[in-house]
Amino acid sequence: PRGRTLRVIATNDFHGAFEPRADSSGVRRGGAAYVATLIKQARAECAQSGECESMLLDGGDMFQGTAPSNRTYGATVVELYNTLGYAAAALGNHEWDWGRDSLRARMRQARYPILAANVRLADGGDVDWVRDDTLLTVGNVKVGVIGLTTVGTPRATMAVNVADFRFVPPAPVVNERARALRARGADAVVIVAHAGAFCERADAEPKCDGEIVELARGITERVDAIVSGHTHSPVNTHVNGIAIVQARSHGRAVGVVDIPLGWGGPAAVAVRDVLTDSVAPDPAVDAL
């Protein structure tokens, strides 16, 4: 698909934050209906160009955090995500908080796969109910999506819930899965990873450090973009030629990555803040 663009629209660490919240300065940010409006705008911009296909991805930690989500063990968030049309999501450490039975129930409810390729059984075997990756058709573009979760998961959820699982270093897994997805015809490969970074602004390109940066440095196969999460921080950078985005947390921002297909130029990365005084809430999601 030479000359076309794949637009990845990204969220992460939603934590059941359905309603807007005021920050320390009193500015209201986030809220599901406002996030929906920014997602719709990003999709519309892509569609209007005529040479762009878009997909919506999430970097994990979708459920845990508010009463409307916690009291349903995340079912209300999955209903929202199904409505918004997510294509895939990463498995966050807090997805394990209510045990594997609740997690598996949410996976069955979700109309999108929840992915983590670096989760293993204690004996090193594959976890057959946690998918590694998926190959999606977006318009006329085939997109391979690889899921990852932080290797710190045993320390970042109730240890008993993951006692018989191992969370292995992700770079070798990514290289293997990316090769396989390209062999199956993927035009682009995108990672959804519940692993993050913190960035300091330095000139045009920020200086970033963290688990996701180390992963990017260890990737030897062609990967186009990483949707990250976990650190609740804005990430908008390139490492080892790979675009990395993280859109804060709690629906306070939406990430947008434009990947040029066919000619291999650099992807454009942006983090768009969700400010309730500058966008109108989406009526359908507001009603939901």
Image: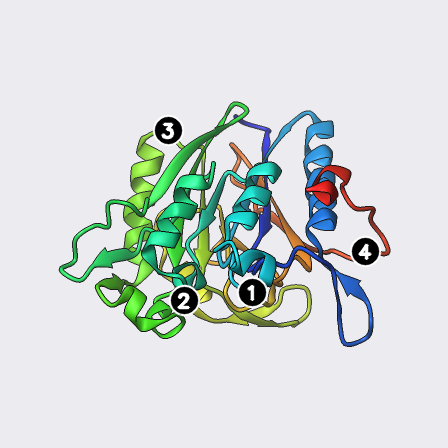
Q: What crowding class fits label 1: few (fewer than 14 Cα within 10 Å), some (14-19), or many (20 or more)? A: some
CA gap between label 1 and label 2 equals 28 Å
Residue drawn 76% across the image and 41% down it: 282
Q: Nearer the viewer, residue 263 or 237?
A: 237
Q: CA distance from mark 1 to mark 4?
A: 21 Å
Image coords of residue 264 (percent x, y): 51, 40
Which circle, 4 or 3, is nearer the viewer? 4
Who comes first in sequence, dot 4 or dot 3? 3
Q: Position of residue 143 (x, y in %)?
A: 45, 35
Could you tell whether 120 is left or right of 215 in the image?
Answer: left
Q: Which residue is located at x 35 percent, y 60 percent?
A: 99
Which of the two marks, 2 or 4, is nearer to us in this view? 4
Secondary element at image label 3:
loop
Q: Which disc, if any, is residue 65?
A: 1
Q: Which mark is residue 276?
A: 4
Residue found at x 73% / y 35%: 45
Q: Which residue occupies the foreground of this view, 127 or 16?
A: 16
* Earlier sequence position, callout 3 versus callout 2: 3
Contact between marks 2 and 4 (CB within 8 A): the answer is no
Is residue 108 among what the camera can see? yes
Answer above or below: position of 223 versus 120: above
Q: Answer with mark 2 or mark 4, whichever residue precedes in sequence.
A: 2
Three-letter code for the amino acid on which mark 3 is drawn: Gly
Kindly identify which residue carries mark 2.
214
Front tag of 1 and 4: 1
Mark 1 or 3 closer to N-term? 1
Between 210 and 153, the residue placed more toward the observer is: 153
Q: CA distance from mark 3 to mark 2?
A: 27 Å
Marks 1, 2: nearer the viewer: 1
Q: Amino acid at mark 2?
A: Glu
Q: Give how far across and how far down residue 18 sits, in percent.
A: 66, 55
For the C terminus, the quadrant is top right
